[in-house]
Amino acid sequence: MLGLHSTSETMNLIKSHRDWMPTFHKEGTVRIEEKVDDLSPECRKSAYISLDQDGNLSLFDGPPRKEKVMRTFFQLDVKALESSMSKEKLRELADGIRITDRDEYNSVLSSFSDYAKEPAKDVMRPSP
């Protein structure tokens, strides 16, 4: 159910999933969140972790592109990252690290949390 939906599709989603949390934005968009302690089937098919344009470790729907950020975890100290990681690992992060299950998701977050500019809190838990 990731992606853009028409107004009627969005309303039907909200009505049929009362436990999901819609957030209405001024520009006319709606963000709907569901608390799940696992990766969704859609996420298992297309999730990547990479850096967004501001240097934040982020989860993307598909290969990393700025309009495809699903969740931002924390800002990375890019200088520390560059000085301690191989060029191969940095390229892998830039290209996006494919995530197919919860263990892989947690492992990648744990690996990069050492490079968070501020202490990373609750990144392994679903967002509120």
Image (spheres, rainbow, N blue to C red):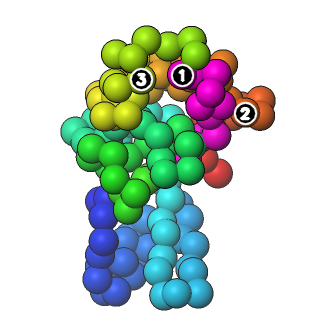
Residue 15: % across, % down: 42, 76
Q: Earlier in the sequence, mark 2 or mark 3?
A: 3
| Residue located beneath label 1 in the image | 82
Q: Please rate how many residues cluster around mark 2, counting C-alpha atoms within 10 Å: few if below 14, some from 14 to 19, many from 20.
A: some
**Distance between mark 2 and mark 3 Cα atoms:** 17 Å
Q: Over which residues does the magenta segment extend?
A: 72-82
Q: Earlier in the sequence, mark 2 or mark 1?
A: 1
| Residue located beneath label 3 in the image | 90
Residue drawn at the location 34% of the way across and 16% of the way down: 88
Residue drawn at the location 42% of the way across and 37% of the way down: 50
| Residue located beneath label 2 in the image | 117
The reply to whether callout 1 and callout 3 are in contact (CB within 8 Å) is yes
Residue 86: % across, % down: 43, 12
The reply to whether callout 2 and callout 1 are in contact (CB within 8 Å) is no
Q: Quadrant of residue 83?
A: top right
Rendered image: mark on residue 19: none
